[in-house]
Structure formats: structure tokens, C-alpha cells
Image (tube, rainbow, N blue to C red):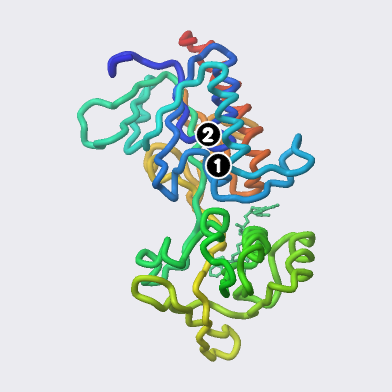
Amino acid sequence: MTNRQIRTIIIIGSGPAGLTAAIYSARANLAPLVIEGEPSSTSDQPGGQLMLTTDVENYPGFPEGVMGPELMAKFREQAQRFGAEMVTDRVTRVDLSGPPHGIWVGDPDAPEPTYRAWAIIVSTGAQSLMLGLEAEERLIGHGLSTCATCDGFFFRDQHIAVVGGGDSAMEEAIFLTRFASKVTVIHRRDELRASKIMQDRAFANERIEFLWNSAVTALCGEEKLTGAEVQNTVTGKSASLDVTGLFIAIGHRPNTDLFKGQLKRKKNGYLITDPDSSGTEVEGVFACGDVQDDFYRQAVTAAGSGCMAAIDAERWLESAGHS
Ligand code: NAP
């Protein structure tokens, strides 16, 4: 396909939403192209957030649970089985003034888009929030992590901290007890946000201890993490925590910067879709998954919305005479 040819449908992002949209649109003979993301990226890695997860116990159809990366490999295989085409690259610019709409990968200043498509499904997902501490960028991958699955192994028999009080933080803490000698959960309040079942599991785990009303104020170490400074949010007292690993699990932000000024977003950055639909205010542009969902944020709801987006796009393409 040359740059000048117009694709029927392009899907940006390859998490549960994007790949479900790919399965449905491929089975509808729309020959979708999926721009998967960039492997080295934390914001748009192929496969999305489940690539950074361990056991997924709540995805229907897997009574014994399934590892996140394994589940995404199955999604991908299923999409390819029906002819979805994958490109491992990241989108750097979009022009949604069509249809047809333009998509750039590589140089965003290139005069012509790399791809054009009548319909676009946006499924760029969300990414981990960071604490905003000065040393974060330097120490990420050197003791500081947002992914227990990826990095837990490196902390065998060590003392690790996890920041956050939600389900992600509990999941990370529990997983890390497989490796660590001790896991300290640092939470800014004195009660958890996590679901009851996850709280119970964390409280029952002898290797997990809780540091309540506490905020990490500094990360220590030049080339690798050697500890953290923690301040009590009630007393104001500071203390050093002797940890060699620190995992941040404080929530997510949607990957919507690409669409600023072109698609409507909520105050928190999530895309706005039409009620009971995946449609956006731009003709031929649909959104699904975590990029437009700040409420459920589950793999299964993302997959469901990917299905909706593919059906919405298919119907729109047909009505507009592009299928
Ligand atoms: P979350 O529920 O939004 O929890 C974020 C946690 O981080 C909260 O405890 C919050 O504190 C804390 N936090 C936020 N900003 C902070 C900061 N700057 N400094 C320190 N702490 C900060 O996010 P999540 O745990 O990632 O979960 C997101 C969604 O996915 C939830 O709906 C969750 O149920 C779901 N999820 C489910 C599973 C599962 O079922 N297995 C696993 C993971 C996630 P406050 O409590 O004080 O606000």
C-alpha cells in the first residue's frame, strides 16, 4: 500500500480494546491495520497495560487465571488469524479533519501522513502515574519501577516498597512477596482504596507491612535506588526507608495528548464519546477502552468497548459508502 492509498480502517493501540476491535473489523472484511505502539515505551507498549500485569483472575473464560502478557498474545493471534495487519510503531501525529483522516508515524513534521483511513479507532489506553519526584527519571529501571511482573524478579530477598492504596498497589505488593523478604506498602491515608478481597489478601500476607499516612518525599541513590525518604502526613515527621526497590502504583493517565484540540476530552484528559456509543464528535473517529473510560477500567470492559467501536465503525463505513 502506498501513502496515497486510503485504508478502510486503522486502529491505534493494541490493548484489549484495540485488539478486540481488530478481531471484529477483520472478521467484517475491513482489513484493519493496527498500529500497535512502541515496545520500549511505557505509555504505548504493544499489548497495553496487561503486558505489565501478572495474574489476571477476573477475565472470563480463564477459571484458573491467566498471565497478562499471555492473554494479550492470544488476543493478537486471534486478530491476525482473521487478517488484521500489525505495525509495531508509534503514532506521532494525527489529522482528523477528514474523513479521510491522516496518521503519521516517525517524523511528525513530514508533509504527508504515513497512512490515511476513512475510519479510525482510537484505543491508546492509559499509563501509570508517577509521583513527580526529581530522581524518578534517573532511577526508573534502576530500583524504581511501575511493573512488578517485569522487575520483581530482580529483588529476590530484598526489602521493597509499594506506593499506593488501590487494587494495583495490593496486586503489586502481593506479587512481590514471591521474591522480596519484606514488602512495605506506603499509603498517604490510613485506609485503603482497594477492593475488600484485595485488602483481605494483603492484610493476610505476613510479608506485607503498611506504612499509613505516609508520602514518599525523596528517592535516594545516584545510579540505583538505595532508599526513600518518607514523611508522615499527620505528624510531619520524616524517616528514611531502607529499600532497594520501590514500585509506584498510584493510578493512571489516559494517552490522549495526540488528540489535543482535535477530539473532545474531559478535564482529566479522557476522551468523550457519544452516549451509548463509541463515536466521537468527529465523523469516522471512534474511541474505546481506557482512553475513554475513567470509571470501569477493566480488561473485559475495554474488550467490550472495542467490539462496540468495530461495529460502530463498520456501520458508519457502510452508511458512508466506504466499506
Ligand atoms: P486507584 O484505584 O485510583 O488507586 C490509586 C491509589 O494511589 C489510591 O490509593 C490513591 O490514594 C493513591 N495515590 C494517587 N495519587 C497519589 C500520589 N500522588 N501519591 C501517593 N498516593 C497516590 O488506581 P489503581 O489501583 O491503579 O486501580 C485503578 C482501577 O483498576 C480500579 O478501578 C481498580 O479496582 C482496578 N484494578 C483492579 C484490579 C483487580 O481487580 N485485580 C487490579 C488492578 C486495578 P487515595 O486512596 O488517597 O486516593
Badge 1, how many Cα within 10 Å: few under 14, some, many 20+? many
Using residue 308 as the reference point, say whether residue 291 is left or right of it: left
Q: Quadrant of residue 71?
A: top right
| 249 horizontally vs 122: left or right | right
Label 2 element class: strand
Q: Nearer the viewer, residue 62 or 132?
A: 62
Which corner quadrant of the figure contains ligand 1?
bottom right
Marks 1/2: CA distance? 7 Å
The residue closer to the viewer here, 280 or 108, is 108
Residue nearer the viewer, 45 or 288: 45
Q: Which residue is mark 2?
A: 287
Judged from the image, the secondary structure of the residue bearing numbered disc 1 is helix
Residue where numbered disc 1 is placed: 292
Looking at the image, which residue is at 47% across and 79% down? 227
The reply to whether discs 1 and 2 touch (Cβ–Cβ < 8 Å) is yes
In the rendered structure, which amino acid carries the disc numbered 1?
A: Gln
Residue shown at 50% from the left, 20% from the top: 84
Q: Is residue 283 visible?
A: no
User: From the viewer's perspective, is 155 left or right of 94?
Assistant: right
Residue type, numbered disc 2: Ala
The percent position of residue 193, horizontal first and vertical second, equals: 69, 65
